[in-house]
Image: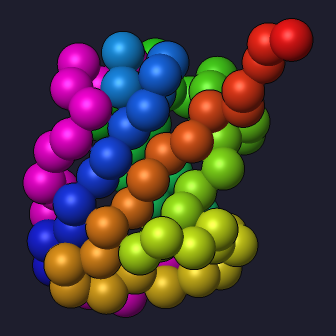
């Protein structure tokens, strides 16, 4: 199934683009997506544990399922003052 991946800040830097379409197996959950992404982009592995993941505009737990045409956003922690 196809999903739309949005990657912000350092996650976008690792992926080389802030947006990409990605093909994943049907039934993929957020945690499994992490494995798919870190296999394709190994430099994402150290960031993955710190990322918040939103699916279709809502923060998602690791066991949240993805659906065809889901929009998945990778949100690194924000720092500043």
Q: Quadrant of the C terminus?
A: top right
Quick check: can you spot residue 12?
A: yes
Q: Residue at x 64, y 68 (%)?
A: 59
Q: Position of residue 12 (x, y in %)?
A: 36, 26
Q: Residue at x 31, y 67 (%)?
A: 71
Q: Is 39 or 70 nearer to us in this picture?
A: 70
Q: Residue furthest front?
A: 81
Q: Nearer the viewer, residue 39 or 68?
A: 68
Magenta span: 14-30
* The N terminus: image quadrant: bottom left
Count of marks overlaid on the render: 0
In this view, 78 is above or below 36: above
Quadrant position of residue 21 = bottom left
Please state if 79 lies on the left or on the right of 55 as rendered.
Answer: right
Residue 38 figure quarter: top left
Residue 39: tell me if it is visible.
no
In reply to whether residue 69 is colored magenta, the answer given is no
The quadrant holding residue 8 is top left
At 26% across and 32% down in the image, what residue appears?
18
Image height check: is 16 above or below 5? above
């Amino acid at each position: 199934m196809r999903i739309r991946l949005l990657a912000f800040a350092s996650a976008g830097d690792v992926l080389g683009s802030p947006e990409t379409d990605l093909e994943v197996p049907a039934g993929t959950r957020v945690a499994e997506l992490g494995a798919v992404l870190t296999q394709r982009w190994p430099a994402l592995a150290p960031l993955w544990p710190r990322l918040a993941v939103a699916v279709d505009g809502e923060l998602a737990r690791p066991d949240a399922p993805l659906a065809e045409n889901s929009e998945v956003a990778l949100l690194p922690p924000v720092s500043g003052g």
